[in-house]
Image (cartoon, rainbow, N blue to C red):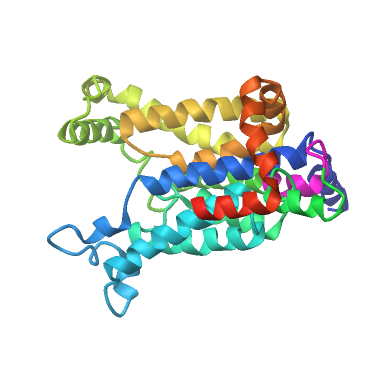
């Protein structure tokens, strides 16, 4: 047992190249992608239908009264404001907490929480881990810029301290647990994934009809797979085996790269064939990109310098005021 704990400790605390820089840049990528997610749906549209959404959304049934249009708009405005502050790196712990709390409220108003059809990674796990393991405001933020102007020592983006990799490794463990759990539930308990050999072909036909109703294209493989149910059954077994194999994320870098490349194809096929959106999972996968190395390649370009000069000329306090006005 002590040997196992020692190995885990070495894995948990080993350096990560460009840890501070890639974590700080990820904060910006996360906030901007979250803003795009918010822009997809206006909360006020909840009450644009003839009948209210309360029977379908459990959270609304707990409220003593239906929220007003102004309150719904206020939730959206506050979340957008918090995300812009987070992207700019202003009061990062406070803005992260606001993103977590307001995002939870907004998600509860829109849908039930779920792994497949929910957005637990960007809404819950990432902001929560960023609060527990802070550090994504130490680089590429107005907070860091102001601290440097006060005479505090800056944190180098090339800093490889394991403290800036805590969120990365925590999400890695989450993925290594959640995917095998999904595969396990498909074959145990009330799972029907392997009980019916035509489940996937029938599902493809049903989602193909849904796609046509919404004005999209029909999946040509649906009828073919329904006529070759044995192939569909092997695909069902393959999906279970693929999800169970995610325990190998903890095995090493090579296995991790193969699995991440495979899972992007898996999600794309699921979205096109079965209309299952895993867009929220992209927030987790983006954590493993070395954004610092990408930025170092871009920063030498003239366009990067042109974009950087106005903010440097403004100074931290004027830049802070400018970002607050934009928010």
Instruction: Estimate the x, y position of residue 260 in percent, counting from the top left.
Output: 58, 30
Q: Is residue 224 left or right of residue 30?
A: left
Instruction: Estimate the x, y position of residue 57 in percent, counting from the top left.
Output: 30, 63
Residue interval drawn in magenta: 156-169
Residue 246 quadrant: top right
Residue at image x 34%, y 28%? Answer: 272
Residue at image x 23%, y 25%? Answer: 226
Q: Against 236, is 315 above or below?
A: below
Q: Against 143, is 33 above or below?
A: above
Instruction: Estimate the x, y position of residue 232 in percent, counting from the top left.
Output: 33, 26
Q: Does the magenta-highlighted stretch encompass residue 165?
A: yes
Residue at image x 55%, y 38%? Answer: 244
Report the number of discs: 0
Q: Is residue 303 left or right of residue 81?
A: right
Question: Quick check: can you spot residue 230?
Answer: yes
Q: Does the magenta-highlighted stretch encompass residue 203?
A: no
Residue 194 quadrant: top left
Task: Give the camera-side residue of 283 and 43.
Answer: 43
Extreme residue toward the left, this view: 50
Residue at image x 56%, y 50%? Answer: 323
Question: Quick check: can you spot residue 136?
Answer: no
Task: Give the camera-side residue of 69 and 214.
Answer: 69
Q: Is residue 141 left or right of residue 49?
A: right
Q: Is residue 154 left or right of residue 303?
A: right
Task: Give the camera-side residue of 111 and 146.
Answer: 146
Instruction: Estimate the x, y position of residue 281 in percent, counting from the top left.
Output: 50, 41
């Amino acid at each position: 047992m002590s040997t196992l704990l020692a190995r885990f400790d070495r894995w948990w605390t080993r350096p990560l190249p460009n840890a501070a820089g890639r974590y700080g840049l990820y904060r910006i990528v996360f906030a901007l992608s979250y803003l795009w997610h918010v822009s997809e749906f206006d909360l006020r549209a909840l009450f644009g239908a003839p009948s209210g959404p309360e029977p379908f959304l459990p959270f609304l049934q707990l409220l003593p009264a239906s929220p007003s249009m102004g309150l719904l708009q206020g939730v959206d405005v506050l979340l957008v404001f918090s995300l812009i502050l987070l992207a700019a790196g202003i009061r990062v712990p406070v803005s992260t907490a606001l993103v977590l709390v307001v995002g939870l409220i907004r998600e509860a108003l829109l849908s039930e929480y779920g792994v497949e059809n929910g957005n637990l990674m960007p809404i819950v796990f990432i902001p929560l881990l960023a609060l527990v393991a802070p550090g994504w405001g130490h680089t590429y933020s107005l907070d860091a810029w102001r601290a440097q102007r006060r005479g505090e020592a800056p944190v180098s983006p090339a800093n490889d301290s394991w403290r800036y990799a805590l969120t990365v490794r925590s999400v890695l463990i989450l993925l290594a647990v959640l995917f095998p759990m999904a595969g396990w539930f498909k074959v145990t308990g009330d799972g029907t994934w392997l009980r019916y050999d035509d489940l996937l072909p029938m599902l493809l036909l049903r989602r193909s009809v849904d796609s046509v109703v919404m004005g999209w294209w029909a999946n040509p493989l649906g009828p073919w797979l329904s006529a070759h149910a044995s192939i569909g059954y092997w695909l069902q077994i393959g999906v279970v085996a693929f999800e169970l194999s995610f325990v190998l994320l903890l095995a090493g870098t090579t296995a991790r790269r193969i699995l991440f490349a495979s899972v992007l194809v898996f999600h794309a096929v699921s979205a096109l064939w079965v209309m299952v959106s895993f867009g929220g999972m992209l927030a987790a996968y983006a954590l493993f990109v070395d954004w610092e190395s990408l930025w170092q390649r871009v920063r030498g370009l003239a366009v990067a310098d042109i974009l950087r000069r106005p903010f440097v000329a403004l100074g931290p306090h004027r830049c802070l005021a400018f970002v607050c006005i934009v928010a």
